[in-house]
Image (cartoon, rainbow, N blue to C red):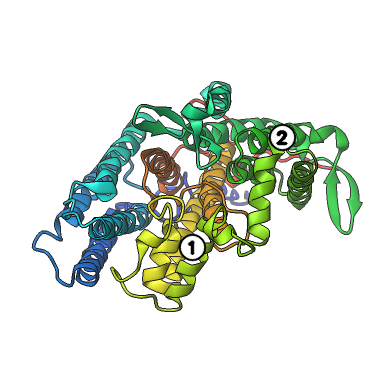
Amino acid sequence: MTAPATPAPQPPPASNAHGPAGQSAPAGRRPRTRRNVELALLVFALMLLLGYMAAMEAGALGEISGDFWVPVAILGAIFLCAHLVIRFLAPYADPVLLPAVALINGIGVVYLRRVDLARADAAKQPDPGTFGGVGGKQLLWTLLAVALAMGVLAIVRDHRALSRYAYTLGLSGVVLVLIPVVLPASLSEINGAKLWIKVGGFSIQPGEFAKIMLLVFFAVYLVRKREVLSLASKRFMGIDFPRGRDLGPVVTVWLLSLMVLVVSKDLGTSLMYFGMFVVTLYIATERSSWLIIGLMLFFGGVFAAYFLGAAIGGPFANFYQRAEIWLDPFSGDRPYDDGYQLVQSLLGLGTGGLFGAGPGKGYPTEIPEVHSDLIFAGIGEEIGLFGLTSLLVIYLLIVERGLRAALGVRDSFGKLFAGGMAFTVALQLFVIIGGITRLIPLTGQTTPFLSAGGSSLMSNWVLIALLLRISAAARNPMSTSATVGVSGGRGTPPARLHEAPTEMIR
Protein backbone atom coordinates (compact mmCIF):
# COMPACT_ATOMS: atom_id res chain seq x y z
CA MET A 1 0.00 0.00 0.00
CA THR A 2 1.49 3.30 -1.05
CA ALA A 3 1.33 6.59 0.81
CA PRO A 4 -0.81 9.33 -0.71
CA ALA A 5 1.11 11.82 -2.81
CA THR A 6 1.87 15.17 -1.27
CA PRO A 7 -0.25 17.83 -2.98
CA ALA A 8 1.66 20.39 -5.00
CA PRO A 9 1.89 23.85 -3.42
CA GLN A 10 -0.79 26.18 -4.71
CA PRO A 11 -0.04 29.79 -5.67
CA PRO A 12 -1.38 32.42 -3.30
CA PRO A 13 -4.74 33.92 -4.20
CA ALA A 14 -4.69 37.09 -6.24
CA SER A 15 -5.38 40.30 -4.40
CA ASN A 16 -8.01 42.84 -5.31
CA ALA A 17 -7.62 45.77 -7.66
CA HIS A 18 -6.05 47.90 -5.01
CA GLY A 19 -3.08 45.59 -4.54
CA PRO A 20 0.37 45.97 -6.10
CA ALA A 21 0.79 46.10 -9.84
CA GLY A 22 0.96 42.70 -11.46
CA GLN A 23 -1.85 41.12 -9.39
CA SER A 24 -5.29 40.56 -10.77
CA ALA A 25 -8.68 41.19 -9.26
CA PRO A 26 -10.76 38.32 -7.84
CA ALA A 27 -12.61 36.28 -10.43
CA GLY A 28 -15.99 37.67 -11.38
CA ARG A 29 -15.19 41.13 -10.04
CA ARG A 30 -14.31 43.98 -12.35
CA PRO A 31 -11.33 46.06 -11.18
CA ARG A 32 -12.31 49.52 -9.96
CA THR A 33 -10.70 52.41 -11.80
CA ARG A 34 -11.83 55.16 -9.37
CA ARG A 35 -12.64 57.49 -12.26
CA ASN A 36 -16.02 58.36 -10.75
CA VAL A 37 -14.23 59.39 -7.57
CA GLU A 38 -12.04 61.67 -9.68
CA LEU A 39 -15.14 63.16 -11.34
CA ALA A 40 -16.84 63.80 -7.99
CA LEU A 41 -13.72 65.47 -6.58
CA LEU A 42 -13.38 67.56 -9.74
CA VAL A 43 -16.98 68.78 -9.49
CA PHE A 44 -16.40 69.64 -5.82
CA ALA A 45 -13.26 71.62 -6.75
CA LEU A 46 -15.20 73.56 -9.39
CA MET A 47 -17.91 74.40 -6.85
CA LEU A 48 -15.24 75.79 -4.52
CA LEU A 49 -13.83 77.86 -7.37
CA LEU A 50 -17.29 79.21 -8.20
CA GLY A 51 -17.78 80.27 -4.59
CA TYR A 52 -14.31 81.85 -4.46
CA MET A 53 -14.97 83.79 -7.66
CA ALA A 54 -18.30 85.10 -6.33
CA ALA A 55 -16.72 86.12 -3.01
CA MET A 56 -13.82 87.79 -4.81
CA GLU A 57 -16.07 89.91 -7.02
CA ALA A 58 -18.32 90.81 -4.07
CA GLY A 59 -15.28 92.01 -2.13
CA ALA A 60 -13.56 93.81 -5.01
CA LEU A 61 -16.57 95.32 -6.82
CA GLY A 62 -19.19 95.42 -4.08
CA GLU A 63 -21.43 93.26 -6.25
CA ILE A 64 -21.40 90.02 -8.19
CA SER A 65 -21.45 90.52 -11.95
CA GLY A 66 -23.78 88.53 -14.15
CA ASP A 67 -20.95 86.74 -15.94
CA PHE A 68 -18.81 85.91 -12.90
CA TRP A 69 -19.27 82.21 -13.62
CA VAL A 70 -17.77 82.31 -17.14
CA PRO A 71 -14.06 81.80 -16.19
CA VAL A 72 -15.01 78.92 -13.88
CA ALA A 73 -17.16 77.38 -16.61
CA ILE A 74 -14.24 77.55 -19.05
CA LEU A 75 -11.96 75.94 -16.47
CA GLY A 76 -14.60 73.30 -15.84
CA ALA A 77 -14.78 72.46 -19.54
CA ILE A 78 -10.98 72.19 -19.75
CA PHE A 79 -10.64 69.96 -16.70
CA LEU A 80 -13.63 67.77 -17.58
CA CYS A 81 -12.10 67.15 -21.01
CA ALA A 82 -8.87 66.16 -19.25
CA HIS A 83 -10.89 63.80 -17.06
CA LEU A 84 -12.40 62.13 -20.13
CA VAL A 85 -8.96 61.71 -21.70
CA ILE A 86 -7.61 60.14 -18.51
CA ARG A 87 -10.66 57.89 -18.33
CA PHE A 88 -9.75 56.37 -21.70
CA LEU A 89 -5.94 56.65 -21.79
CA ALA A 90 -5.03 56.00 -18.14
CA PRO A 91 -8.10 54.49 -16.46
CA TYR A 92 -6.20 53.31 -13.39
CA ALA A 93 -4.42 56.62 -12.73
CA ASP A 94 -4.55 58.21 -9.29
CA PRO A 95 -8.01 59.84 -8.89
CA VAL A 96 -6.79 62.66 -6.63
CA LEU A 97 -4.04 64.24 -8.74
CA LEU A 98 -6.22 65.93 -11.38
CA PRO A 99 -8.79 67.47 -8.96
CA ALA A 100 -6.06 68.75 -6.61
CA VAL A 101 -4.05 70.37 -9.41
CA ALA A 102 -7.22 71.73 -11.02
CA LEU A 103 -8.20 73.43 -7.75
CA ILE A 104 -4.83 75.13 -7.35
CA ASN A 105 -4.74 76.14 -11.02
CA GLY A 106 -8.25 77.55 -10.70
CA ILE A 107 -7.39 79.51 -7.57
CA GLY A 108 -4.52 81.07 -9.51
CA VAL A 109 -6.82 82.08 -12.37
CA VAL A 110 -9.37 83.60 -9.96
CA TYR A 111 -6.72 85.57 -8.09
CA LEU A 112 -5.17 86.84 -11.31
CA ARG A 113 -8.63 88.06 -12.26
CA ARG A 114 -8.60 89.85 -8.89
CA VAL A 115 -5.29 91.49 -9.82
CA ASP A 116 -6.78 92.66 -13.12
CA LEU A 117 -9.70 94.31 -11.31
CA ALA A 118 -7.36 96.05 -8.85
CA ARG A 119 -5.11 97.37 -11.62
CA ALA A 120 -8.09 98.57 -13.66
CA ASP A 121 -9.47 100.38 -10.62
CA ALA A 122 -6.11 102.00 -9.83
CA ALA A 123 -5.70 103.19 -13.44
CA LYS A 124 -9.37 104.33 -13.66
CA GLN A 125 -9.91 101.97 -16.57
CA PRO A 126 -12.85 99.66 -17.33
CA ASP A 127 -12.91 96.01 -16.38
CA PRO A 128 -10.62 94.13 -18.83
CA GLY A 129 -13.22 91.37 -19.08
CA THR A 130 -13.02 87.61 -18.84
CA PHE A 131 -10.42 87.21 -21.58
CA GLY A 132 -8.39 90.35 -20.85
CA GLY A 133 -5.46 91.04 -18.54
CA VAL A 134 -3.24 88.44 -16.90
CA GLY A 135 -6.27 86.44 -15.76
CA GLY A 136 -7.51 86.01 -19.32
CA LYS A 137 -4.03 85.05 -20.50
CA GLN A 138 -3.78 82.49 -17.72
CA LEU A 139 -7.03 80.93 -18.91
CA LEU A 140 -5.47 80.51 -22.34
CA TRP A 141 -2.24 79.13 -20.88
CA THR A 142 -4.29 76.67 -18.83
CA LEU A 143 -5.99 75.41 -21.99
CA LEU A 144 -2.64 74.99 -23.76
CA ALA A 145 -0.98 73.41 -20.72
CA VAL A 146 -3.73 70.84 -20.17
CA ALA A 147 -3.83 70.05 -23.91
CA LEU A 148 -0.05 69.51 -23.87
CA ALA A 149 -0.32 67.29 -20.78
CA MET A 150 -3.01 65.16 -22.37
CA GLY A 151 -0.88 64.93 -25.53
CA VAL A 152 2.02 63.63 -23.44
CA LEU A 153 -0.35 61.14 -21.82
CA ALA A 154 -1.40 59.92 -25.28
CA ILE A 155 2.17 59.65 -26.60
CA VAL A 156 3.85 58.13 -23.52
CA ARG A 157 1.87 54.92 -23.09
CA ASP A 158 4.67 53.31 -21.06
CA HIS A 159 6.82 55.53 -18.84
CA ARG A 160 9.76 53.12 -19.23
CA ALA A 161 10.04 54.09 -22.89
CA LEU A 162 11.52 57.42 -21.73
CA SER A 163 14.57 55.56 -20.43
CA ARG A 164 15.58 54.80 -24.02
CA TYR A 165 16.22 58.50 -24.61
CA ALA A 166 17.83 59.27 -21.26
CA TYR A 167 21.14 60.61 -22.57
CA THR A 168 19.47 62.57 -25.37
CA LEU A 169 17.06 64.14 -22.90
CA GLY A 170 19.89 64.85 -20.44
CA LEU A 171 21.95 66.61 -23.09
CA SER A 172 18.89 68.55 -24.26
CA GLY A 173 18.21 69.62 -20.68
CA VAL A 174 21.75 70.94 -20.24
CA VAL A 175 21.48 72.86 -23.52
CA LEU A 176 18.18 74.42 -22.43
CA VAL A 177 19.75 75.52 -19.16
CA LEU A 178 22.76 77.04 -20.93
CA ILE A 179 20.88 78.94 -23.65
CA PRO A 180 19.88 81.90 -21.41
CA VAL A 181 23.42 81.94 -19.99
CA VAL A 182 25.07 82.55 -23.35
CA LEU A 183 22.47 85.03 -24.58
CA PRO A 184 22.99 88.75 -23.89
CA ALA A 185 21.17 90.19 -20.89
CA SER A 186 18.73 92.06 -23.13
CA LEU A 187 17.40 88.73 -24.40
CA SER A 188 17.58 86.63 -21.24
CA GLU A 189 17.50 88.68 -18.03
CA ILE A 190 14.39 89.57 -15.98
CA ASN A 191 14.65 90.97 -12.46
CA GLY A 192 18.38 90.26 -12.37
CA ALA A 193 18.12 86.53 -13.25
CA LYS A 194 19.26 85.16 -16.64
CA LEU A 195 16.66 82.41 -16.98
CA TRP A 196 14.63 83.49 -19.98
CA ILE A 197 14.60 83.62 -23.75
CA LYS A 198 12.89 86.83 -24.87
CA VAL A 199 11.84 87.35 -28.46
CA GLY A 200 9.71 90.43 -29.06
CA GLY A 201 6.85 90.39 -26.57
CA PHE A 202 7.14 86.64 -26.01
CA SER A 203 9.31 85.01 -23.35
CA ILE A 204 9.94 81.41 -22.32
CA GLN A 205 11.83 79.90 -19.38
CA PRO A 206 13.58 76.81 -20.82
CA GLY A 207 14.80 75.65 -17.42
CA GLU A 208 11.23 74.70 -16.50
CA PHE A 209 11.24 72.02 -19.20
CA ALA A 210 14.87 71.10 -18.59
CA LYS A 211 14.10 69.87 -15.07
CA ILE A 212 11.93 67.02 -16.41
CA MET A 213 14.54 66.04 -18.99
CA LEU A 214 17.29 66.03 -16.37
CA LEU A 215 15.14 63.94 -14.04
CA VAL A 216 14.84 61.25 -16.71
CA PHE A 217 18.62 61.21 -17.09
CA PHE A 218 19.23 61.18 -13.32
CA ALA A 219 16.82 58.28 -12.84
CA VAL A 220 18.40 56.14 -15.58
CA TYR A 221 21.96 56.92 -14.49
CA LEU A 222 21.27 56.11 -10.85
CA VAL A 223 19.45 52.88 -11.66
CA ARG A 224 22.54 51.69 -13.50
CA LYS A 225 25.01 52.92 -10.87
CA ARG A 226 23.03 52.34 -7.69
CA GLU A 227 25.03 49.27 -6.61
CA VAL A 228 28.33 51.15 -6.85
CA LEU A 229 26.98 54.29 -5.18
CA SER A 230 25.50 52.20 -2.35
CA LEU A 231 28.91 50.88 -1.28
CA ALA A 232 30.11 52.26 2.05
CA SER A 233 33.64 53.19 3.04
CA LYS A 234 33.58 54.37 6.66
CA ARG A 235 30.96 54.53 9.38
CA PHE A 236 30.77 57.78 11.36
CA MET A 237 28.19 58.49 14.09
CA GLY A 238 26.11 55.54 12.94
CA ILE A 239 26.01 56.66 9.28
CA ASP A 240 27.74 54.79 6.46
CA PHE A 241 29.51 57.25 4.17
CA PRO A 242 30.32 56.39 0.54
CA ARG A 243 33.76 55.84 -0.88
CA GLY A 244 35.68 58.91 -2.05
CA ARG A 245 35.94 57.57 -5.59
CA ASP A 246 32.11 57.55 -5.84
CA LEU A 247 31.72 61.27 -5.15
CA GLY A 248 32.44 62.20 -8.78
CA PRO A 249 28.82 62.48 -10.00
CA VAL A 250 27.75 64.53 -6.98
CA VAL A 251 30.70 66.89 -7.28
CA THR A 252 30.03 67.31 -11.02
CA VAL A 253 26.37 68.22 -10.52
CA TRP A 254 27.39 70.47 -7.61
CA LEU A 255 29.82 72.39 -9.82
CA LEU A 256 27.18 72.75 -12.53
CA SER A 257 24.64 74.04 -10.02
CA LEU A 258 27.15 76.59 -8.71
CA MET A 259 27.74 77.69 -12.29
CA VAL A 260 24.00 78.25 -12.62
CA LEU A 261 24.07 80.23 -9.35
CA VAL A 262 26.91 82.48 -10.49
CA VAL A 263 26.11 82.94 -14.17
CA SER A 264 22.30 82.84 -14.12
CA LYS A 265 22.23 84.80 -10.84
CA ASP A 266 19.49 82.65 -9.36
CA LEU A 267 19.78 80.66 -6.14
CA GLY A 268 16.42 78.91 -6.56
CA THR A 269 17.23 77.26 -9.89
CA SER A 270 20.65 76.16 -8.63
CA LEU A 271 19.12 74.66 -5.49
CA MET A 272 16.39 72.92 -7.51
CA TYR A 273 18.79 71.16 -9.91
CA PHE A 274 21.20 70.05 -7.22
CA GLY A 275 18.38 69.06 -4.86
CA MET A 276 16.73 66.93 -7.57
CA PHE A 277 19.93 64.94 -8.09
CA VAL A 278 20.78 64.45 -4.41
CA VAL A 279 17.27 63.35 -3.43
CA THR A 280 17.03 60.98 -6.42
CA LEU A 281 20.41 59.59 -5.35
CA TYR A 282 19.08 59.12 -1.82
CA ILE A 283 15.99 57.29 -3.14
CA ALA A 284 18.20 55.04 -5.27
CA THR A 285 20.73 54.11 -2.56
CA GLU A 286 18.66 54.61 0.64
CA ARG A 287 21.73 56.13 2.28
CA SER A 288 21.17 59.29 4.32
CA SER A 289 24.88 60.07 4.03
CA TRP A 290 24.24 61.35 0.50
CA LEU A 291 21.81 63.94 1.88
CA ILE A 292 24.38 65.05 4.45
CA ILE A 293 27.11 65.32 1.82
CA GLY A 294 24.77 67.17 -0.53
CA LEU A 295 23.75 69.73 2.10
CA MET A 296 27.36 70.29 3.13
CA LEU A 297 28.46 70.80 -0.47
CA PHE A 298 25.62 73.14 -1.40
CA PHE A 299 25.75 75.36 1.67
CA GLY A 300 29.53 75.40 1.50
CA GLY A 301 29.31 76.63 -2.09
CA VAL A 302 26.71 79.26 -1.17
CA PHE A 303 28.84 80.60 1.69
CA ALA A 304 31.87 80.70 -0.60
CA ALA A 305 29.88 82.63 -3.24
CA TYR A 306 28.72 85.09 -0.58
CA PHE A 307 32.20 85.82 0.76
CA LEU A 308 33.66 86.04 -2.75
CA GLY A 309 30.93 88.53 -3.62
CA ALA A 310 31.87 90.62 -0.62
CA ALA A 311 35.58 90.42 -1.40
CA ILE A 312 35.87 90.66 -5.18
CA GLY A 313 32.35 91.26 -6.50
CA GLY A 314 32.31 90.40 -10.19
CA PRO A 315 30.06 87.47 -11.05
CA PHE A 316 29.31 86.93 -7.33
CA ALA A 317 28.07 90.50 -6.73
CA ASN A 318 24.43 89.80 -7.56
CA PHE A 319 24.18 86.91 -5.11
CA TYR A 320 25.95 88.95 -2.42
CA GLN A 321 23.41 91.75 -2.88
CA ARG A 322 20.47 89.36 -2.59
CA ALA A 323 21.94 87.79 0.53
CA GLU A 324 22.44 91.22 2.13
CA ILE A 325 18.82 92.14 1.42
CA TRP A 326 17.71 88.86 2.93
CA LEU A 327 19.77 89.42 6.09
CA ASP A 328 18.39 92.93 6.73
CA PRO A 329 15.69 94.12 4.32
CA PHE A 330 14.59 97.04 6.52
CA SER A 331 17.90 98.84 6.89
CA GLY A 332 18.44 102.30 5.38
CA ASP A 333 16.63 102.93 2.13
CA ARG A 334 16.24 99.25 1.27
CA PRO A 335 12.46 99.14 1.92
CA TYR A 336 12.09 101.70 -0.89
CA ASP A 337 14.88 100.43 -3.14
CA ASP A 338 16.33 96.96 -3.74
CA GLY A 339 14.52 95.46 -0.72
CA TYR A 340 11.10 96.68 -1.81
CA GLN A 341 9.87 93.30 -3.07
CA LEU A 342 10.73 91.39 0.09
CA VAL A 343 9.42 94.10 2.42
CA GLN A 344 6.07 94.37 0.61
CA SER A 345 5.78 90.60 0.62
CA LEU A 346 6.25 90.48 4.39
CA LEU A 347 3.82 93.37 4.92
CA GLY A 348 1.20 91.65 2.76
CA LEU A 349 1.45 88.43 4.76
CA GLY A 350 1.40 90.39 8.02
CA THR A 351 -1.68 92.34 6.95
CA GLY A 352 -3.53 89.13 6.20
CA GLY A 353 -3.01 87.77 9.71
CA LEU A 354 -4.78 84.55 10.64
CA PHE A 355 -8.00 84.92 8.65
CA GLY A 356 -7.09 87.43 5.94
CA ALA A 357 -8.77 90.60 4.78
CA GLY A 358 -11.25 88.57 2.74
CA PRO A 359 -11.39 87.65 -0.95
CA GLY A 360 -11.20 90.78 -3.07
CA LYS A 361 -10.45 93.08 -0.13
CA GLY A 362 -6.65 93.15 -0.22
CA TYR A 363 -4.27 95.56 -1.96
CA PRO A 364 -2.50 93.50 -4.62
CA THR A 365 -1.22 96.61 -6.43
CA GLU A 366 1.03 97.31 -3.43
CA ILE A 367 2.96 94.05 -3.90
CA PRO A 368 5.39 94.03 -6.85
CA GLU A 369 5.26 91.02 -9.19
CA VAL A 370 2.11 89.87 -7.40
CA HIS A 371 1.01 88.05 -10.54
CA SER A 372 4.11 85.85 -10.71
CA ASP A 373 6.91 85.64 -8.12
CA LEU A 374 4.96 86.98 -5.13
CA ILE A 375 1.48 85.64 -5.83
CA PHE A 376 1.57 83.57 -2.64
CA ALA A 377 1.98 86.73 -0.58
CA GLY A 378 -0.90 88.43 -2.40
CA ILE A 379 -3.22 85.49 -1.85
CA GLY A 380 -2.13 85.29 1.79
CA GLU A 381 -3.16 88.89 2.35
CA GLU A 382 -6.74 87.98 1.45
CA ILE A 383 -7.18 84.46 2.84
CA GLY A 384 -4.79 84.65 5.80
CA LEU A 385 -2.63 82.02 7.46
CA PHE A 386 -5.44 79.49 7.72
CA GLY A 387 -6.23 79.83 4.02
CA LEU A 388 -2.57 79.49 3.05
CA THR A 389 -2.26 76.43 5.28
CA SER A 390 -5.19 74.83 3.44
CA LEU A 391 -3.51 75.65 0.13
CA LEU A 392 -0.28 74.06 1.33
CA VAL A 393 -2.20 70.94 2.37
CA ILE A 394 -3.44 70.57 -1.22
CA TYR A 395 0.16 70.86 -2.44
CA LEU A 396 1.17 68.30 0.16
CA LEU A 397 -1.55 65.99 -1.16
CA ILE A 398 -0.12 66.26 -4.69
CA VAL A 399 3.37 65.42 -3.44
CA GLU A 400 2.03 62.53 -1.34
CA ARG A 401 0.16 61.02 -4.28
CA GLY A 402 3.30 61.32 -6.39
CA LEU A 403 5.32 59.49 -3.76
CA ARG A 404 2.59 56.86 -3.51
CA ALA A 405 2.88 56.27 -7.25
CA ALA A 406 6.65 55.90 -6.80
CA LEU A 407 6.12 53.29 -4.08
CA GLY A 408 3.52 51.39 -6.06
CA VAL A 409 5.24 51.07 -9.43
CA ARG A 410 7.40 47.98 -9.84
CA ASP A 411 10.32 49.10 -12.02
CA SER A 412 13.27 50.99 -10.56
CA PHE A 413 13.25 53.71 -13.22
CA GLY A 414 9.60 54.50 -12.49
CA LYS A 415 10.27 54.67 -8.76
CA LEU A 416 13.16 57.11 -9.12
CA PHE A 417 11.44 59.20 -11.79
CA ALA A 418 8.14 59.54 -9.91
CA GLY A 419 9.89 60.20 -6.60
CA GLY A 420 12.07 62.85 -8.23
CA MET A 421 9.10 64.59 -9.84
CA ALA A 422 7.12 64.63 -6.58
CA PHE A 423 10.11 66.05 -4.73
CA THR A 424 10.62 68.69 -7.45
CA VAL A 425 7.15 70.11 -6.83
CA ALA A 426 7.85 70.23 -3.09
CA LEU A 427 11.30 71.79 -3.55
CA GLN A 428 10.05 74.47 -5.96
CA LEU A 429 7.30 75.35 -3.50
CA PHE A 430 9.82 75.52 -0.64
CA VAL A 431 12.12 77.80 -2.61
CA ILE A 432 9.45 80.39 -3.44
CA ILE A 433 7.65 80.30 -0.08
CA GLY A 434 10.96 80.36 1.76
CA GLY A 435 11.87 83.46 -0.24
CA ILE A 436 8.70 85.46 0.39
CA THR A 437 8.74 84.58 4.11
CA ARG A 438 12.46 85.43 4.45
CA LEU A 439 13.48 81.88 5.31
CA ILE A 440 15.96 81.92 2.41
CA PRO A 441 16.98 84.69 -0.04
CA LEU A 442 14.22 85.68 -2.45
CA THR A 443 14.51 83.99 -5.83
CA GLY A 444 12.78 84.25 -9.18
CA GLN A 445 10.98 80.92 -8.96
CA THR A 446 7.25 80.76 -9.70
CA THR A 447 4.67 79.05 -7.51
CA PRO A 448 3.59 75.84 -9.29
CA PHE A 449 0.14 76.11 -10.94
CA LEU A 450 -0.57 79.46 -9.26
CA SER A 451 1.71 82.04 -10.85
CA ALA A 452 1.01 83.65 -14.21
CA GLY A 453 3.13 82.45 -17.10
CA GLY A 454 3.06 79.71 -19.67
CA SER A 455 6.46 78.04 -19.18
CA SER A 456 5.92 77.07 -15.55
CA LEU A 457 2.30 76.08 -16.06
CA MET A 458 2.96 73.89 -19.09
CA SER A 459 6.01 72.15 -17.65
CA ASN A 460 4.25 71.39 -14.37
CA TRP A 461 1.19 70.02 -16.16
CA VAL A 462 3.50 67.77 -18.20
CA LEU A 463 4.99 66.62 -14.90
CA ILE A 464 1.50 65.80 -13.62
CA ALA A 465 0.74 63.88 -16.83
CA LEU A 466 3.83 61.73 -16.29
CA LEU A 467 2.86 61.14 -12.67
CA LEU A 468 -0.60 60.08 -13.86
CA ARG A 469 1.00 57.64 -16.31
CA ILE A 470 3.24 56.12 -13.62
CA SER A 471 0.39 55.94 -11.10
CA ALA A 472 -1.73 54.17 -13.73
CA ALA A 473 1.01 51.54 -14.09
CA ALA A 474 1.27 51.22 -10.31
CA ARG A 475 -2.48 50.84 -9.72
CA ASN A 476 -3.34 48.73 -12.76
CA PRO A 477 -4.16 45.18 -11.54
CA MET A 478 -3.29 43.81 -14.98
CA SER A 479 -0.03 45.75 -15.19
CA THR A 480 3.06 44.09 -16.63
CA SER A 481 5.32 46.79 -15.23
CA ALA A 482 7.32 44.34 -13.18
CA THR A 483 10.75 44.61 -14.77
CA VAL A 484 13.16 45.78 -12.11
CA GLY A 485 15.63 48.08 -13.77
CA VAL A 486 15.65 50.21 -16.90
CA SER A 487 13.80 48.71 -19.80
CA GLY A 488 12.32 50.06 -22.94
CA GLY A 489 10.20 47.00 -23.59
CA ARG A 490 6.89 45.82 -22.28
CA GLY A 491 8.39 43.91 -19.36
CA THR A 492 7.36 40.51 -18.03
CA PRO A 493 4.85 39.55 -15.36
CA PRO A 494 6.34 39.13 -11.90
CA ALA A 495 7.33 35.66 -10.88
CA ARG A 496 5.42 34.18 -7.98
CA LEU A 497 7.20 34.11 -4.67
CA HIS A 498 7.81 30.33 -4.67
CA GLU A 499 9.36 30.60 -8.16
CA ALA A 500 11.69 33.49 -7.36
CA PRO A 501 15.45 32.76 -7.36
CA THR A 502 17.44 33.11 -4.16
CA GLU A 503 20.92 34.45 -3.66
CA MET A 504 23.26 34.09 -0.71
CA ILE A 505 24.82 37.37 0.42
CA ARG A 506 27.85 37.17 2.66
From this viewpoint, is residue 83 visible? Answer: no
Q: How many marks?
A: 2
Q: Is residue 270 left or right of residue 197?
A: right
**Position of 300 compared to 436: left or right?**
right
Few, some or many residues within 10 Å of mark 1 (<14, 14–19, 20+)? many
Query: Residue at point 52% right, 66% down?
Result: 346
Q: Nearer the viewer, residue 160 or 505?
A: 160
Depth check: give the residue in front, 425 or 281.
425
Q: Residue furthest bottom?
A: 354
* Residue 344: mark: 1
Q: Quadrant of residue 327?
A: bottom right
Cα distance in 3D space between marks 1 and 2: 29 Å
Image point (25%, 65%), residue name: 44
Q: Is residue 192 above or below residue 25?
A: above
Furthest residue in direction left, as rendered:
66
Q: Secondary structure at mark 2?
A: helix
Residue at 36%, 62% in the rendered image: 364
Given the image, on which type of amino acid does mark 2 rest? Gly
Kindly identify which numbered label has been placed on residue 314.
2
